[in-house]
Image (cartoon, rainbow, N blue to C red):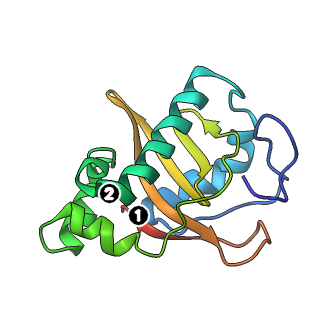
Amino acid sequence: MNSHSLPGCGLLSGKRSRMPLGSLSALVLAAPVAFALGGCGSPEAASAASAASRFVRLAADDPAAACELLAPRTREKVTEEAKGSCAEGLRSQLASAATDGPDVEPEIAGHTAKVATGGQTVFLSLFEDGWKVLAAGCTRASEDTSTPYDCALEGD
């Protein structure tokens, strides 16, 4: 969530936010309404926040372990772009991503989450074995909430 968001429970300002993630962009187009309806303080929110924070920390310290926290398609894309090594792909794609910053209440919409942690935004999806990262190292070019996210790491 950014500085233009309303306080409390992850409510958005009502402006549409978009993230260019190919097939994932539909998630973000619906996010303002869906995230506003999400469960503030729910176990899902705490679990999503924990997964995002853990990913950001591991991406910097142990990229091989961080790869295990990626959604399958995202892991495939990172590995493919790195020509065979997910860990090397994470190192190169997230080299300039922020790793320090405030954590903000996660925004949950069904089986998807948007978490601002460590100075970046992380988008996740809930799988049978827990929350997995769809995109990371996401920032906006400006404070205008109508601008799309630019993500250093994303799946299809």
Disc assigned to residue 74? 2
Location of residue 153 (image quadrant): bottom left
Q: Amino acid at mark 2?
A: Thr
Vertical relation: 28 (above or below) 110: below
Q: Is residue 104 left or right of residue 83?
A: right
Residue drawn at x 68%, y 40% is: 34
Tag 1 residue: 154
Q: Amino acid at mark 1?
A: Glu
How dense is the environment of label 2, judged by Cα within 10 Å: few (below 14), some, or many (20 and up)?
many
Location of residue 44 (image quadrant): top right
Image coordinates of residue 142 in percent, x first then y, are 74, 77
Q: Is residue 41 left or right of residue 98?
A: right
Q: Are marks 1 and 2 in contact (CB under 8 Å)?
A: yes
Location of residue 156 (image quadrant): bottom left
Between residues 120 and 33, which one lies in front from this camera angle?
A: 120
Residue drawn at x 41%, y 48% is: 55
Residue drawn at x 85%, y 53% is: 13
Residue that lies at the very extreme toward the top in this rendered image: 43
